[in-house]
Amino acid sequence: MTENPRRQFLKSAGVALGASLAFAVPGHSSSTERNSSSLQVWSCGGLAEAMMPANAKFTEKNGSDIAYTGAFAGALGKSLLTGGAQTEVFAPRVLELAQKLKAQGKMLHYTPLCYTRYVMITPKGNPAGIETIEDINKPGIKPVIIPDASPPGGLASMVILKKAGVQEAAIKNAVSKGDCVQTSVPDIISGKGDVAVVEYRLTQLPQFKGKVEIIDISEKHYPPAPIPFTIGLMKWAKDRELAEEYIKFILSDAGQQFFQMAGFIPAGSEEGKRLTAKYGVKDV
């Protein structure tokens, strides 16, 4: 299995992100090789499983190369807000980041892209009989938690546990306390742990799909910040027409299908429209 694009990017980039930084998808041009038919696209690393096939489809249709970076949105955002970095299209997580970039004049406009949701996962057959998140409080339940994972993977799951009134029990009875969401899922698959809170998108990764039971979590327990993803045009776009064409494709039915297949809720779906209204995701 290839290394997680977010971790690969952060290893090569370090803490400070510069204007020349890019993670190029194999077979695509890097940012230093850009010409009028190439486009630099950055996104939250969690979107990589959708963005990479979508980018490949756009290249197939359009002939333009995509120099793609998928990494922790906070690090990318900081580099754009204060570090002097540049990109042409950016798909961040957390609406506030898009709003800050727009306020600084660095993002010209943005639009809803997709939404994530959180679920509980258990081993196949659900041997502990988990039905609701409140069951984590029951004696003998062995949770898997990820308190040290990079936000929002770790923080969001802990907030959900706290809002559901089960965080104390989850911490006390945890059989695993990881620092990476993806490396913690195998503890559920193997039966080491009874239950974990994760993003639904993780259950759709090839290495995990069909290997766990999935139980919904009430939306009332969700922390709002990590739910929306947006996509926006940056002021540094050298070919604005190409950048707009790319964004239009990503938001089209053909582009959005990759996000649905990766476990996201497309912004253009009926559920996506409901969430757009709920979270107030609009360019102002």
Image (spheres, rainbow, N blue to C red):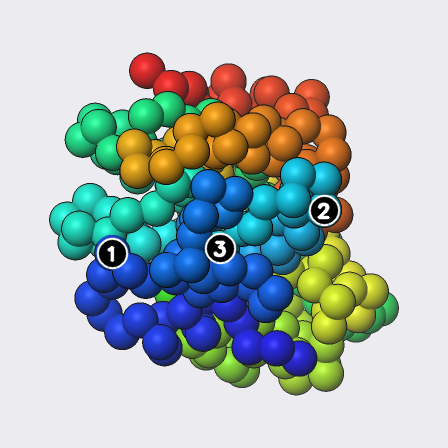
Q: CA distance from mark 1 to mark 3?
A: 14 Å
Q: Answer with mark 1 or mark 2, whichever residue precedes in sequence.
A: 1
Identify the residue at horizontal 38%, vertical 41% (top origin): 88
Q: Quadrant of residue 94?
A: top left
Say whether disc 2 or disc 3 marks the residue closer to the N-terminus.
Answer: 2
Is residue 39 among the parts visible in the rendering?
A: no
Quadrant of residue 203 within the rendered picture: bottom right
- Residue farthest toward the front in the current orientation of the protein: 35
Q: Is 283 rendered above or below residue 202?
A: above
Q: In the rendered view, does 38 fall on the left or right side of 251?
A: left
- Give the percent coordinates (x, y) of residue 237: 37, 36
Residue drawn 22% across and 28% down? 105
Give the residue number, with chain letter if any, for mark 2: 60
Report the residue marked by disc 1: 19
- Disc 1, disc 3: CB below 8 Å? no
Q: Residues within 10 Å of mark 1 (few under 14, many from 20)?
A: few
The C terminus is located in which quarter? top left
Residue 35, how many percent across, how many down? 44, 48
| Residue type indicated by callout 2 | Glu
* Residue 103 image offset from top left, x and y in percent: 21, 26
Query: In the rendering, which numbered label is found on residue 67?
Result: 3
**Few, some or many C-alpha atoms within 10 Å of disc 2 (few <14, some 14-19, many ≥20)?**
few
Q: Nearer the viewer, residue 198 or 192?
A: 198
Query: Disc 2 versus disc 3: distance between alpha carbons?
Result: 14 Å
Name the element at disc 2: helix
